[in-house]
Image (cartoon, rainbow, N blue to C red):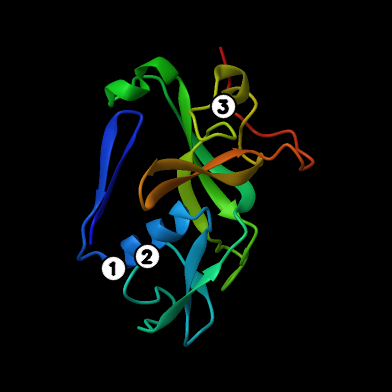
Amino acid sequence: MSVTGEYLGMGLSVPENDEHNLAYFRYCAEHDFRLQKCSSCDLLHYPPTTGCPFCMGAESEWVSVEGKGEVHSYGEVHHAIQPAWKDHTPYLFLLVDLDTQKDEPTEHDALRILANLVTEDGQPAPQDQVKLVGIGTRVRMVFADAGEGISIPQFAIDEEAQQPTPWRYPQE
């Protein structure tokens, strides 16, 4: 059965024939971040898919993963395409290197997740937080509930972590 939801007034839907994403978002709805672990090479991979991108193995199991990491890169949006985001500009989307499986299978690899910078309750981060984040900022996963059976994994600044001086594009 498909799942539907809404986030900031935007409709979300995962069709019933997309079994891997359905499983992924159902775990997220339980605030349990899980990724597929290949049964052949034991590496985790993201996004959910039918085969391992490292060894092409077809079998996997879902395992819980700690959603902590550091910002690998980011984009700052000043012109919202979606009307629901207009009041939140500028906002950040982050490419996060998870601590789990960093530098595997090579030193250039990491589990990288693309998500928005949000507050602890899953709402778009206010400008004072946006200005603090750059490459190297420590973040942790939070979930934005979007309906029955679907939550969106997002990232908030990890207040418990020692923060480096992040690299940022020059600001106004």
Residue position marked by numbered label 3 in the rendering = 169
Label 3, secondary structure: give it: loop
| Residue at the disc numbered 1 | 19
Query: What secondary structure is found at the residue carrying circle 2?
Result: helix
Mark 2 surroundings: few (<14), some (14-19) or many (≥20) residues within 10 A = some
Q: Residue furthest top?
A: 172
At a point 53% along the width and 61% down the height, the residue shown is 111
Tell me if mark 1 has few (under 14), some (14-19) or many (20+) residues whose alpha carbon lies within 10 angstroms of its own: some
- Which class describes the residues within 10 Å of circle 3: few (<14), some (14-19), or many (20+)? few
- Look at mark 2 in the image and give the residue it sits on: 23
- Which quadrant would the C terminus be assigned to in this image? top right
Q: Is residue 16 left or right of residue 75?
A: left
Residues at marks 1 and 3, CA–CA distance in whole angstroms: 39 Å
- At a point 43% along the width and 19% down the height, the residue shown is 88
Q: Are marks 2 and 1 in contact (CB under 8 Å)?
A: yes
Q: Amino acid at mark 3?
A: Tyr
Where residue 8 sits in the image (x, y, percent)?
36, 29
